[in-house]
Structures are given as structure tokens and as C-alpha cells.
Image (cartoon, rainbow, N blue to C red):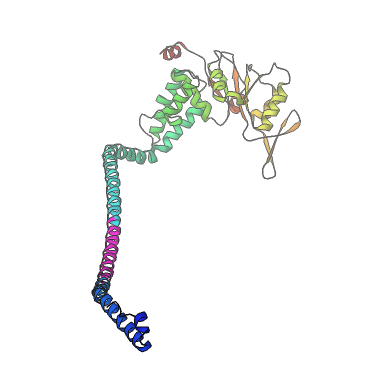
Amino acid sequence: LPFFNYETMKGKSVAAANLANWVVNCVKYHLIYIKVAPLMEKLEESTRTKAEAEESLALVKAQVAEIEDQCAQLNEKLTGAVNEKERVEKEAATCLEKLQLAERLVNGLADEYVRWTNTVKELKLLTVSLIGNCLLASAFVGYVSPFSMKFRLQLWKEHWTKDVTDKAIPYTPGIDPLFVLATEAEIASWQNEGLPSDRVSIENAAVVVSCSRWPLMIDPQLQGVKWIKQRKGEDLTCLQFSMNNWLQKVIFCIQMGGQLLIEAVGSEIDAIIEPVLARAVIRRGRSSMIIKIGGEEVDYDPKFQLTLQSKLPNPHYRPEIAAQCTIINFIVTPEGLEDQIP
């Protein structure tokens, strides 16, 4: 109604105006409420549905988290299994390789068994025959070197071997003293150093490296000297009695423990080095050693080595020289030259 409002009714009655205003407001509220009420119900329903959905979501998230944890554990187990598989495969490959190597080694050792068995038998026999072998080799070094090839063979092959057999001294039948004194590798090494390849030269080299007395080489063709110089190299001091101050060089080598080669020795050796040839060494204290040369005391180094060489084809030395030195015959013979021809 157009007149049913607060302002119109106020002119009639204030109480009626307020009552009319209340009625109007109630009508407005009713009109608004009938529109808002369904929305509020929908809001409540939506809120309830949201809460239920959030609860379901939380439950699903918990389940997802649990499943993800299980997946992580399974992935970890898978990674461990893969690593273990790779380790086992690698170990298997290593074992297979070792097995192949072991098979090759066993097959190779099977071929060596016969040789080792024969070697053991030879060594057992050698323990018995070593006395006679060493006896022949010692006699070879001490006595055979001044002579020619023919006389050397007569000495050790006919006389000494027969004497050892007659005295029942055990030795290796058919033993060659040369191969008691030197191996094939040592002989090849000497030949690489310039030693001629004939039998006499090889025997002489074996005597040179084995004798305990100073070697005195009868070497007119200088084959032995050439080998000694190449063998000793720069450590070798060479001199002759005709040189100036040769005695000082001898004394220096004795004091320093050097290796000395005296070349072109005549049939007589200077008496001043007689104490050196005789090894007349005097020991003082625990380690000090001296030798008297020309009335002068000189420190003696045990490492000192002396080699003498003569160019005379047939020298005659005093018995004392033969006792002090090992005379070695390096004279080249036609048979030796034939052996040296490749």
C-alpha cells in the first residue's frame, strides 16, 4: 500500500508509524528469507559435502603416501637387487677368467711335470756326484790352463777321469769340467763381450773368472786382453812396466780396490810387486789391511783385482810366479782359428 509506510503513518500516529515500519520490515525480511533460505541450505549442504570430500581426500592422501613409501622401499630393494646382480655377474666373470687362467696354468704345468721330475732326479744324483765334479773342475782351473787343447783333453779326459774312477770317487759320467765352471748363459755373455767362440778361449775365460790366484795370460794375439778390456770397461786401469809412474798407479788401484791390468809383461816380473803377487797382506785390527810395497806400507782394499798379460809366445817364468799366478794359455792355434770361423 502506498500510504503504509513510516512517514505517512507518522503523521497519524507515532505508534502506528513504528508498527507499520515493523510490518514493512517483516515483509521485506520474509521476501529476502524465502530467497536466501534455499541458498543457506545449499551452503550448509555444500559445506558438509566439502568436509566429507576433504576427509576422503585426506584418507586418499594417506593411502597414496603409504603406497609411495612402499614404492620407495620396493625401488630401494630393486636397486639393491640390481647392484647385487651386477656384483655377482662381475664376480662370476672374474672367477671364470681365473678358472681359464688356472686351466692354462695347469695345462702348462702338466708339460713341465716331466722336466721337473727329470730335474729332481738329476739333482739327487748331483748331490752324490758333486764331490768328483768339483774335484775335476778344481784341477782344471789349477793345472790345465797353461797347456794346449790336445794336452788339456789328455789330462782331464784320460788321466784325471780315470784316476777319479779308480779311486771310486762319485762323479757324473761324461762330465765336462767347463760346464761345471760356467753355464751356457755365462758363455754367451762372454762371447758378447768379445771372447772368441773356440773351445780353448772359452776354457780360458772360465779359468780367469774362477781362479783364486792372479791370472797371467800368455796372449801374443791380444784376444784375451781385448775380452778383459770389454768385460771390465771403464773400471779397468791398464798400464805397462815401461810407463812413467806405473808404481803409483798400482798403489792407487790397491788402495781404491780397483781393477788393474798389467800388459806386455816379460819373462821376469818386477820384484817390487812381489808382495802383490804373493798377496802378502797384513791385517791390523778388525778391518784394516795393509801391504808393503817398496818398503812402504799401503792400505789394501780386498776388492782389488789384478790381471797380467804377456805377449811372449813361450815365456819361462820362475816357479814362484807359477805358484802365485794362474798361467793361462791364450795362444791362437790353427784349430782354434777354425773354431772361430762361423
Instruction: Check the image and report above or below for 164 versus 35.
Output: above
- Point out residue 234 in the picture as x, y percentages from the top left corner: 60, 24
Residue 138 position (above or below residue 311): below
Q: Residue at x 72, y 25 (%)?
A: 248
Q: Position of residue 167 (x, y in %)?
A: 40, 35
**Where does the C terminus fall, quadrant-wise?**
top left
Q: Nearer the viewer, residue 69 or 161?
A: 69
Q: Residue at x 27, y 56 (%)?
A: 78
Q: Residue furthest front?
A: 12
Quarter occupied by the N terminus: bottom left
The location of residue 154, given as percent across then percent down, is 42, 22
Which quadrant of the view contains residue 5? bottom left
Q: Which residue sits furthest right?
A: 295
Q: Is residue 239 above or below residue 84?
A: above
Magenta: main secondary structure: helix
Report the label total. Answer: 0
Between 337 and 132, the residue placed more toward the observer is: 337
Q: Which residues are magenta?
A: 53-78
Where residue 43 appears, as percent x and y from the top left, is 27, 73
Residue 314 magenta-highlighted: no
Magenta-colored stretch includes residue 62: yes
Is residue 174 rendered to the left or right of residue 139?
left
